[in-house]
Amino acid sequence: MTGRMMEEIEKILIAEMPDWVLVYGDTDSTLAGALAACKLHIKLAHVEAGLRSFNMQMPEEVNRILTDRVSSVLFCPTDKAIENLQNEGFKNFDCSIIRSGDVMYDAAIFYQRKATKPKTAVPEKFILCTVHRAENTDDVNNLNGIFSALETISADIPVLVPIHPRTKSVLQKNNYDFNNSKICFIDPVGYFEMIWLITNSVLVMTDSGGLQKEAYFFKKKCVTLREQTEWEELITCGCNVLAGADSETIIEKVKFMLNVTTDFSQPLYGNGNAGQDIVRALNR
């Protein structure tokens, strides 16, 4: 996929010859755009630079490290991201490191007023949970541990899961009993519906990187179903905890987070002007 994307992106870059290529995040398309620009000697800027989970088994980690290394400008969403780059010696490279804030926070503020309740019936009180990351869906033990915990938790508070197609497929192959499940499964939802679900939940559980931040944006505590996170500042401030995929640990962490008092007042991701600051920096 990355190779095919590079071929097609290169055609566009040769035709347009832009002054800059701007890539976001850590997806395969991010790396493809970065490599295509680098090989054509077009300046590259990376938004969400400097993030690290320190798990090289994650394809996203490989993508973000390689993209950072070939970028001329690194737009970091957090102080921790800048610290990561400094620890890796980026001050010795020919690049600029800029603390821009987080463009996802810009979007969350802008679109909050468009939040839409899903058409599917939703419990009055619920925990919102998403599971899609390969380290969980490709590992049957991890998936069983997570969904065993969700079944137990759902006996007290309904757990609402917009089920990812890949996750659903793996569960079906392993004969998961959807008919007798206590979990409230719904079809995948769009961004505006997801904002509504986050805002109206009592807690967020996820293995998603983005949803961990969105929980913080909308002042919701989060239990992360992974062993590490690239958003370490959420752990430090106490608004997020790592639970992994062990059933008992997940249940314990959920109980803890439901009862703990947290502080969402810190501007960890800027003030909502990241996009404007990035444009100003590129113009300079």
Image: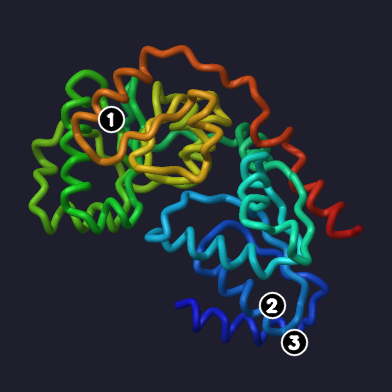
**139 left or right of 8 in image:** left
Name the front one of labels 1 and 2: 2
Q: Residue at x 68, y 48 (%)?
A: 76
* Residue 237 image offset from top left, x and y in percent: 54, 25
> Mark 1 highlights which residue?
159
SS of the residue at dot 2? helix
Type of amino acid at the residue the image marks with label 2 = Ala
Quadrant for residue 203, please give it. Answer: top left
Q: Residue at x 19, y 57 (%)?
A: 170
Task: Locate the N terminus by quadrant.
Answer: bottom left
Kindly give the residue lying farthest to the right in the view shown: 284
Among the two numbered marks 2 and 3 on one chain, the one whose residue lies closer to the N terminus: 3
Among the two numbered marks 1 and 2 on one chain, the one whose residue lies closer to the N terminus: 2
- Tag on residue 121? none
Q: Is 15 rendered above or below residue 181? A: below
Circles 2 and 3: CB atoms closer than 8 Å: no
- Tag on residue 37? 2
Type of amino acid at the residue the image marks with label 3 = Ala
* Residue 50 image offset from top left, x and y in percent: 62, 52
218 or 34, which lies in front? 34
SS of the residue at dot 1? strand
**17 left or right of 69 in image:** right
